[in-house]
Amino acid sequence: MERLKIAIQKSGRLNEDSLKILKECGISVSNGLDQLRATVSNFPMEILYLRNSDIPQYLIDGVVDIAIIGENLLVEKDSGRIDILERLSFSKCRVSLAVPKTFEYNNIHDLNHKKIATSYPNTLNLFLKEKGIEAELHNISGSVEIAPNIGLADAICDIVSSGSTLFKNNLKEVEVIAKSEAVLAVSPLISAKKKETLDKLRFRLQSVLKARNFKYILMNVPNDKIEEVISILPGMRSPTVLPLAEEGWSSIHTVIEKNKFWEVIDELQQLGAEGILVAPIEKMVI
Ligand SMILES: Nc1ncnc2c1ncn2[C@@H]1O[C@H](COP(=O)(O)OP(=O)(O)OP(=O)(O)O)[C@@H](O)[C@H]1O
Ligand SMILES: O=P(O)(O)OC[C@H]1O[C@H](OP(=O)(O)OP(=O)(O)O)[C@H](O)[C@@H]1O
Ligand SMILES: [Mg+2]
């Protein structure tokens, strides 16, 4: 069978989590990062370790079939030819405009005819065009946040996550241009045969991603409170209720959305639920 070629960032912010999610999909990568290519022993797939910024072109040319890549880079390098298949919920960030803290910023028109340093010229150009702003763009490939401090620009457009790089450089975020996370993207040239393998991979990815959002919860409940407890548990279907060895008590098991747990915990305790356990779920096939 022809192997599905997947591009993964060689080193950097996406590398570790990309390999982690593949591992959770049961894909064992046989050789280490020192090689630019790795085969997979238990799935018809081959891994190519590449620079993040080169990946969109490889997808367009069909050199690789799929890739794990930052959505922001697809916006920057592609004109809609590459489809996003799955959003992977890691490397969340945004592409934003920032100015020095002392800059009295009211709205985007304050950037008219100003100098803006960025590593994302296409994304920025499109945004400025939409807003009818004319600015002088300076393309730099890294350490963009330093530009205003060394007199290179009045503003910057770069990736923001926690905001600490902006803070350290006395800058403030004033406009969010695009939000981004790691995504699974596909080449427009992928063959029908490889699409079958891709569907298998997507099924696994979806099971892993779903499981990350849910917890398995179990608790002991007095029998006369079972109905009430069940009514506040937003479970998948119907919870499992098993009798305990102790007369008058049952154990309730169900699956609950990660964030919902804290919303119902007080009510559960008030109803007399005891021994509440919350456990992670590895895979979820619904
Ligand atoms: N501070 C951050 N927090 C969260 N995600 C980020 C952050 N910085 C970048 N990212 C995301 O991770 C991706 C890779 O960023 P990284 O800095 O590792 O590589 P790069 O310098 O863009 O690429 P290359 O592999 O070409 O050197 C970015 O495209 C973005 O989607
Ligand atoms: O809001 P924060 O959490 O501070 O993150 C934002 C910073 O992270 C990225 O840089 P990175 O550390 O990847 O360095 P790079 O410029 O060498 O890519 C990005 O270019 C910002 O500088
Ligand atoms: Mg970076």
Image (spheres, rainbow, N blue to C red):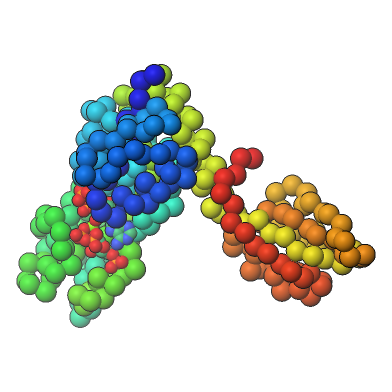
Residue positioned 39% across, 32% down in the render: 41
Q: If the picture is divided into quarters, which one holds ligand 3?
A: bottom left
Picture quadrant where residue 262 is located: bottom right
Question: In this orientation, which residue lies closer to the viewer: 27 or 212?
Answer: 27
Residue 94 is left or right of residue 262, and the answer is left
Numbered label tally: 0
Residue positioned 35% across, 25% down in the render: 3
Question: In this orientation, which residue lies closer to the viewer: 23 or 75?
Answer: 23
Question: In this orientation, which residue lies closer to the viewer: 16 or 77?
Answer: 16
Picture quadrant where residue 265 is located: bottom right
Question: In this orientation, which residue lies closer to the viewer: 78 or 209?
Answer: 209
Residue 229 is left or right of residue 26, and the answer is right
Where residue 66 sits: x, y (%)?
A: 34, 34
With respect to residue 122, does 102 lie above or below? Answer: below
With respect to residue 196, does 227 lie above or below? Answer: below
Residue positioned 59% across, 59% down in the render: 258
Where residue 70 sits: x, y (%)?
A: 32, 48
Where residue 172 sits: x, y (%)?
A: 26, 73
Position of the C terminus, as image quadrant, is top right
Residue 9 is left or right of residue 213, and the answer is left
Where residue 67 sits: x, y (%)?
A: 33, 38
In the displayed orientation, state which residue is furthest to the left.
151
Residue positioned 17% across, 55% down in the render: 119
